[in-house]
Image (cartoon, helix red, strand yellow):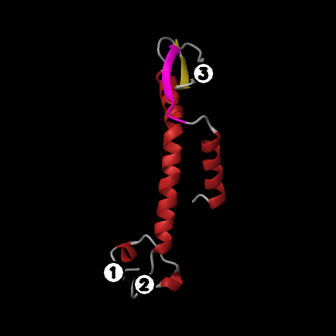
Amino acid sequence: MLTDTELAAIEARANAAAPGEWEASRHARNMHQISDVTGIIADISTWKTGMAGDDKETTANADFIAHARTDVPALVKELRELRAWAATVTHADGCAAEFECDPLCDCHIARKPKC
């Protein structure tokens, strides 16, 4: 599980990157560019021995990087919301809290003592 410090570091890296939505586009053979509305953010290339034509891995890498700009902040937000919700979950009647059962187990979610 990520610590709060690790999550804050991830969020800080995302916040420090160029804002807005990014787009990946093929620039040349085996080269892609990541750009936003203001221009090019990064060039991505793959050079492999014997590689010919389009490199699907480079395309996938470029798409992953471009989408990370909006995906990472969304995931951080979702994780923070889930952690906040999990902190409000109380042990159901009959739950063995002293045994540190999982706060997301069925007994907590459905309020049925199972753990």
In percent of width and height, residue 108 lies at 39, 76
Name the element at disc 1. loop
Single out the mark in the foreground, 2 or 3.
3
Mark 2–mark 3 Cα distance, whole angstroms, equals 54 Å
Q: From what the image shows, is residue 21 above or below residue 30?
A: below
Left-right relation of 106 to 31: left
Q: Amino acid at mark 3?
A: Asp
Name the element at disc 3. strand
Earlier-in-chain disc, 1 versus 3:
3
Magenta stretch, main secondary structure, is: strand
In terms of image quadrants, where is residue 14?
A: top right
Mark 2–mark 1 Cα distance, whole angstroms, equals 8 Å
Q: Which mark is residue 112?
A: 1
User: Which residue position holds label 3?
Assistant: 43
Q: Amino acid at mark 2?
A: Cys
Quick one: label 3, few (<14), some, or many (20+) residues within 10 Å? Answer: some
Single out the mark in the foreground, 1 or 3.
3
Which residue sits at x=52%, y=82%? 99
Quick one: label 2, few (<14), some, or many (20+) residues within 10 Å? Answer: some
What are the residue bounds of the magenta stretch? 20-27
Whether label 1 touches label 3, CB < 8 Å = no
Earlier-in-chain disc, 2 versus 1:
2
Which residue sits at x=50%, y=40%? 70
Q: Quadrant of the N terminus?
A: bottom right
Q: Amino acid at mark 1?
A: Lys
Name the element at disc 2. loop
User: Which residue position holds label 2?
Assistant: 95
